[in-house]
Image (spheres, rainbow, N blue to C red):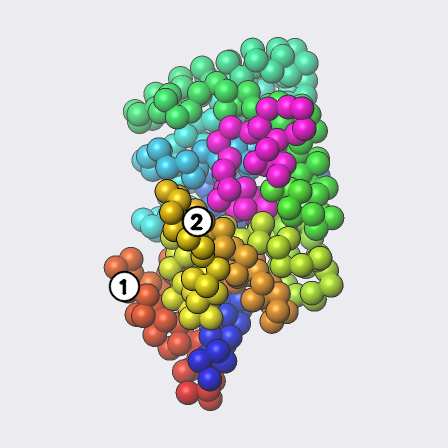
């Protein structure tokens, strides 16, 4: 019976009512604070993902700098948007400064094509100008700028990735369900070129997950027809693990026990145990959902939203499990 309860919880998270793909609060908050036009609806956003290389590049940059952990929260939102009014939501200062600086450079050169900017300046010079302008704008916000963890090389690596057709290759690999290839591209970079600076495993999986939602015809579906992909391993590259996904998932015995049983003595002896657990957790979520023919990315997103909206940080794992049962089993099932 416990396994049936756990399966009901997994299904409940996949179908969690707060999953709303039409909610573009975060990306629109980043855009209008960067003096860019908001997306009016999800269709506009998905179209930009599919067709606009520059937008996709700026999205990668925003995801990277938003989640590097050294930044401060934007002091205010220029539009007073609903997203920012919730104190738990954070729009950080570094990605906004980076995107405003790029927009200003484009306006000075009279072009909105990064390709033309690279042709005129070269990657190294353009990255330097972009970085200097970013610092200049950031100082206006009266917030500290972290030059130790963020420097010209970050922007240079993104421009090189763009120049080497990395954006179109990333789009193509995800559209063709080659999620492992997309992960390697973000982590290792284009073959024979430098890797992207500022994108690690967690951010890479987050980018892939969110792009799958836009670039595939199955990404947003609750149910998953297994033949779409080769196996669960491929799906695991689109399962980012943050605090909430980790705590929610490990509280569910069918998932927690699977991760525990897969840990080896070598894993326990390594310094980065959390990283090893997260890697195995991505696979466990992907494999279990794959077996149940449910979309593991929907579970991942649902677990994050459930934790963010309904779980307090200090609640123990057993308390989380009780809360999950109350929401997805006791009220909606005859299992108990």
Instruction: Answer with left or right where residue 93 lies relative to residue 285.
Output: left
- Asked whether 54 falls inside the magenta stretch, the response is no
Q: Secondary structure at mark 2?
A: helix
Q: Residue at x 38, y 66 (%)?
A: 251
**Mark 1, residue position:** 315
Boundaries of the magenta span:
184-210
Query: Measured along the vertical axis of the image, is residue 283 above or below residue 271?
Result: below
Say which of 189 and 261 sits in front. 261
**Mark 2, residue position:** 266
Q: Residue at x 62, y 55 (%)?
A: 233
Mark closest to the chain's N terminus, 2 or 1:
2
Can residue 297 be seen by looking at this rendering? yes
Distance between the Cα atoms at labels 2 and 1? 30 Å
* Other residues around mark 1 within 10 Å, as few (<14) / some (14–19) / many (≥20): few
Q: Position of residue 158 (x, y in %)?
A: 57, 26
In contact (CB < 8 Å): disc 2 and disc 1 = no
Q: Position of residue 273 (x, y in %)?
A: 39, 48
Q: Quadrant of residue 66?
A: top left
Instruction: Answer with left or right where residue 218 lies relative to residue 298.
Output: right
Instruction: Answer with left or right where residue 24 lies relative to residue 123.
Output: left
Select label 2 or label 1 by which is in front: 2
Q: Position of residue 202 (x, y in %)?
A: 48, 44
* Other residues around mark 2 within 10 Å, as few (<14) / some (14–19) / many (≥20): few
Q: Residue at x 38, y 32 (%)?
A: 93
- Asked whether 187 falls inside the magenta stretch, the response is yes
Q: Position of residue 228 (x, y in %)?
A: 72, 60
Can residue 40 be seen by looking at this rendering? no
Q: Secondary structure at mark 1?
A: loop
Q: Residue at x 43, y 49 (%)?
A: 266
Instruction: Answer with left or right where residue 161 lies relative to residue 335.
Output: right
Query: Measured along the vertical axis of the image, is residue 170 above or below residue 292?
Result: above
């Amino acid at each position: 019976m416990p396994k049936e309860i756990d399966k009901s919880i997994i299904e409940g998270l996949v179908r969690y009512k707060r999953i709303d793909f039409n909610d573009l609060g975060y990306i629109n908050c980043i855009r209008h604070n960067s003096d860019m036009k908001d997306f009016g609806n999800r269709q506009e956003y998905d179209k930009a993902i599919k067709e606009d290389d520059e937008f996709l590049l700026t999205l990668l940059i925003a995801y990277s700098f938003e989640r590097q952990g050294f930044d401060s929260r934007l002091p205010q939102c220029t539009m007073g948007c609903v997203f920012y009014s919730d104190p738990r939501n954070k729009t950080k200062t570094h990605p906004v400064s980076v995107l405003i600086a790029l927009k200003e450079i484009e306006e000075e050169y009279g072009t909105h094509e990064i390709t033309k900017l690279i042709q005129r300046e070269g990657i190294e010079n353009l990255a330097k100008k972009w970085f200097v302008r970013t610092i200049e704008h950031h100082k206006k916000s009266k917030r500290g700028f972290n030059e130790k963890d963020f420097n010209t090389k970050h922007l240079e690596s993104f421009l090189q990735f763009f120049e080497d057709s990395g954006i179109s290759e990333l789009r193509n690999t995800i559209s063709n369900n080659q999620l492992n290839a997309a992960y390697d591209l973000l982590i290792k970079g284009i073959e024979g070129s430098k890797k992207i600076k500022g994108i690690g495993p967690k951010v890479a999986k987050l980018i892939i997950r969110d792009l799958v939602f836009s670039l595939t015809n199955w990404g947003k579906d609750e149910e998953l027809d297994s033949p779409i992909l080769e196996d669960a391993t491929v799906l695991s590259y689109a399962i980012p693990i943050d605090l909430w996904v980790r705590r929610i998932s490990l509280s569910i015995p069918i998932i927690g026990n699977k991760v525990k049983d897969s840990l080896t003595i070598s894993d326990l002896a390594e310094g980065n145990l959390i990283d090893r657990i997260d890697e195995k957790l991505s696979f466990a979520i992907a494999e279990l959902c794959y077996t149940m023919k449910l979309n593991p990315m929907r579970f991942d997103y649902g677990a994050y939203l459930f934790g963010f909206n309904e779980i307090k940080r200090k609640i123990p794992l057993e308390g989380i499990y009780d809360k999950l049962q109350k929401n997805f089993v006791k009220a909606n099932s005859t299992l108990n």
